[in-house]
Protein backbone atom coordinates (compact mmCIF):
# COMPACT_ATOMS: atom_id res chain seq x y z
CA UNK A 1 0.00 0.00 0.00
CA UNK A 2 2.87 2.36 0.78
CA UNK A 3 4.35 1.80 -2.69
CA UNK A 4 0.99 2.59 -4.29
CA UNK A 5 0.90 5.96 -2.49
CA UNK A 6 4.39 6.79 -3.69
CA UNK A 7 3.48 5.93 -7.28
CA UNK A 8 0.35 8.09 -7.11
CA UNK A 9 2.24 11.06 -5.66
CA UNK A 10 4.96 10.69 -8.29
CA UNK A 11 2.36 10.46 -11.06
CA UNK A 12 0.56 13.61 -9.90
CA UNK A 13 3.92 15.36 -9.63
CA UNK A 14 4.66 14.51 -13.26
CA UNK A 15 1.27 15.86 -14.31
CA UNK A 16 1.88 19.16 -12.50
CA UNK A 17 5.22 19.89 -14.22
CA UNK A 18 3.76 21.30 -17.45
CA UNK A 19 1.36 23.47 -15.43
CA UNK A 20 4.26 25.18 -13.62
CA UNK A 21 5.54 26.94 -16.74
CA UNK A 22 4.70 30.61 -17.09
CA UNK A 23 4.46 32.83 -20.14
CA UNK A 24 7.25 35.33 -20.65
CA UNK A 25 6.49 38.66 -22.28
CA UNK A 26 8.82 41.05 -24.10
CA UNK A 27 7.62 44.63 -23.60
CA UNK A 28 8.99 47.74 -25.34
CA UNK A 29 8.14 51.17 -23.90
CA UNK A 30 7.91 54.51 -25.70
CA UNK A 31 11.65 55.18 -25.26
CA UNK A 32 12.60 51.84 -26.78
CA UNK A 33 13.64 50.17 -23.51
CA UNK A 34 13.04 46.42 -23.56
CA UNK A 35 11.71 44.65 -20.46
CA UNK A 36 11.14 40.92 -20.03
CA UNK A 37 8.51 39.90 -17.51
CA UNK A 38 6.38 36.96 -16.50
CA UNK A 39 3.73 39.22 -14.98
CA UNK A 40 0.55 39.99 -16.87
CA UNK A 41 1.43 43.09 -18.94
CA UNK A 42 -0.79 46.14 -19.00
CA UNK A 43 -3.02 46.48 -22.07
CA UNK A 44 -1.35 49.75 -23.16
CA UNK A 45 2.17 48.25 -23.18
CA UNK A 46 3.52 46.88 -26.45
CA UNK A 47 4.18 43.32 -25.34
CA UNK A 48 4.60 40.06 -27.20
CA UNK A 49 4.59 36.56 -25.80
CA UNK A 50 7.90 34.77 -26.29
CA UNK A 51 8.08 31.19 -27.44
CA UNK A 52 8.50 28.71 -24.61
CA UNK A 53 11.50 27.26 -26.41
CA UNK A 54 13.28 30.62 -26.70
CA UNK A 55 15.89 31.32 -24.02
CA UNK A 56 15.57 34.56 -22.07
CA UNK A 57 18.64 36.25 -20.64
CA UNK A 58 18.32 37.45 -17.05
CA UNK A 59 21.29 39.81 -17.31
CA UNK A 60 20.14 43.45 -17.33
CA UNK A 61 21.05 45.35 -20.45
CA UNK A 62 23.39 48.31 -20.48
CA UNK A 63 21.87 51.73 -20.33
CA UNK A 64 22.43 53.83 -23.39
CA UNK A 65 25.35 56.16 -22.78
CA UNK A 66 24.30 59.75 -23.05
CA UNK A 67 26.93 62.43 -23.60
CA UNK A 68 27.58 64.92 -20.83
CA UNK A 69 26.02 68.33 -21.34
CA UNK A 70 28.36 71.10 -22.50
CA UNK A 71 27.90 72.96 -19.19
CA UNK A 72 29.00 69.88 -17.19
CA UNK A 73 32.19 70.70 -15.24
CA UNK A 74 35.33 68.98 -16.54
CA UNK A 75 38.36 68.04 -14.46
CA UNK A 76 41.85 67.87 -15.94
CA UNK A 77 43.92 64.70 -15.63
CA UNK A 78 46.33 65.97 -12.96
CA UNK A 79 43.50 67.09 -10.68
CA UNK A 80 41.76 63.72 -11.09
CA UNK A 81 45.01 61.85 -10.31
CA UNK A 82 45.45 63.94 -7.16
CA UNK A 83 41.87 63.14 -6.13
CA UNK A 84 42.41 59.44 -6.82
CA UNK A 85 45.62 59.47 -4.75
CA UNK A 86 43.81 61.20 -1.88
CA UNK A 87 41.05 58.62 -2.07
CA UNK A 88 43.57 55.78 -2.03
CA UNK A 89 45.30 57.27 1.05
CA UNK A 90 41.98 57.63 2.86
CA UNK A 91 40.96 54.06 2.05
CA UNK A 92 44.36 52.74 3.16
CA UNK A 93 44.05 54.67 6.44
CA UNK A 94 40.58 53.21 6.97
CA UNK A 95 41.95 49.74 6.17
CA UNK A 96 44.75 50.14 8.73
CA UNK A 97 42.25 51.32 11.36
CA UNK A 98 39.93 48.38 10.61
CA UNK A 99 42.81 45.90 10.86
CA UNK A 100 43.76 47.39 14.23
CA UNK A 101 40.13 47.15 15.36
CA UNK A 102 39.95 43.54 14.15
CA UNK A 103 43.03 42.62 16.17
CA UNK A 104 41.51 44.27 19.25
CA UNK A 105 38.18 42.49 18.71
CA UNK A 106 39.94 39.13 18.32
CA UNK A 107 41.90 39.81 21.51
CA UNK A 108 38.70 40.62 23.42
CA UNK A 109 37.03 37.47 22.05
CA UNK A 110 39.99 35.33 23.14
CA UNK A 111 39.86 36.88 26.63
CA UNK A 112 36.12 36.19 26.89
CA UNK A 113 36.57 32.60 25.70
CA UNK A 114 39.11 32.04 28.48
CA UNK A 115 36.70 33.29 31.15
CA UNK A 116 34.26 30.80 32.64
CA UNK A 117 31.75 32.12 35.18
CA UNK A 118 29.96 29.94 37.70
CA UNK A 119 26.45 30.65 36.42
CA UNK A 120 27.25 29.31 32.95
CA UNK A 121 26.74 25.61 33.58
CA UNK A 122 24.66 25.54 30.45
CA UNK A 123 26.95 25.91 27.41
CA UNK A 124 24.29 27.96 25.60
CA UNK A 125 24.85 30.77 28.10
CA UNK A 126 28.53 30.78 27.17
CA UNK A 127 27.62 30.98 23.49
CA UNK A 128 25.15 33.79 24.17
CA UNK A 129 27.79 35.74 26.09
CA UNK A 130 30.40 35.27 23.34
CA UNK A 131 28.09 36.08 20.41
CA UNK A 132 28.51 39.89 20.52
CA UNK A 133 32.29 39.46 20.45
CA UNK A 134 32.07 37.07 17.50
CA UNK A 135 29.74 39.49 15.71
CA UNK A 136 32.23 42.33 16.22
CA UNK A 137 35.05 40.20 14.75
CA UNK A 138 32.88 39.27 11.75
CA UNK A 139 31.93 42.93 11.20
CA UNK A 140 35.56 44.04 11.09
CA UNK A 141 36.44 41.16 8.75
CA UNK A 142 33.65 42.19 6.36
CA UNK A 143 34.77 45.82 6.52
CA UNK A 144 38.35 44.83 5.70
CA UNK A 145 37.17 42.72 2.78
CA UNK A 146 35.07 45.61 1.43
CA UNK A 147 37.92 48.10 1.80
CA UNK A 148 40.35 45.76 0.01
CA UNK A 149 37.85 45.35 -2.80
CA UNK A 150 37.38 49.12 -3.04
CA UNK A 151 41.15 49.69 -3.14
CA UNK A 152 41.42 47.01 -5.82
CA UNK A 153 38.84 48.86 -7.94
CA UNK A 154 40.88 52.06 -7.97
CA UNK A 155 42.74 52.95 -11.15
Image (spheres, grey):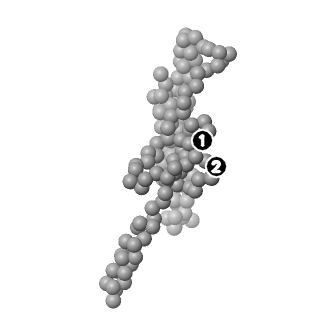
Q: How far is the residue under mark 1 from the one under mark 2?
A: 10 Å
Pick out the residue farthest to the bottom. 1
For the N terminus, the image quarter is: bottom left
Q: Is residue 26 visible?
A: yes
Image mark for residue 44: 2
Residue occupying the point 63% across, 53% down: 43
Residue occupying the point 38% across, 78% down: 9
Q: Quadrant of residue 120?
A: bottom right
Observer-nearest of 67 and 80: 67
In the image, residue 84 above or below residue 11: above
Residue occupying the point 49% across, 38% down: 61
Q: Is residue 28 left or right of residue 50?
A: right
Q: Residues within 10 Å of mark 1 (few under 14, many from 20)?
A: few
**x, y percent for residue 130:** 53, 54
Q: Which residue is mark 1?
A: 29
**x, y percent for residue 48:** 52, 50
**x, y percent for residue 33:** 56, 38
Camera-near label (1 vs 2) is 2
Observer-nearest of 91 and 127: 91
Observer-nearest of 51 and 8: 51
Q: Are marks 1 and 2 in contact (CB under 8 Å)?
A: no
Image mark for residue 149: none
Residue occupying the point 50% across, 41% down: 60
Q: Quadrant of residue 32?
A: top right
In the image, residue 59 above or below residue 18: above
Q: Quadrant of residue 35?
A: top right
Q: Residues within 10 Å of mark 2 (few under 14, many from 20)?
A: few
Amino acid sequence: MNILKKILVFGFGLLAIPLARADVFKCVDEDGHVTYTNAKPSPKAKCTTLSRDQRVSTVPGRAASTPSPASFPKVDGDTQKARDNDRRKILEQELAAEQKSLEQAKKELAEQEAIRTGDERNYQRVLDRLQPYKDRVALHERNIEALKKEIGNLR
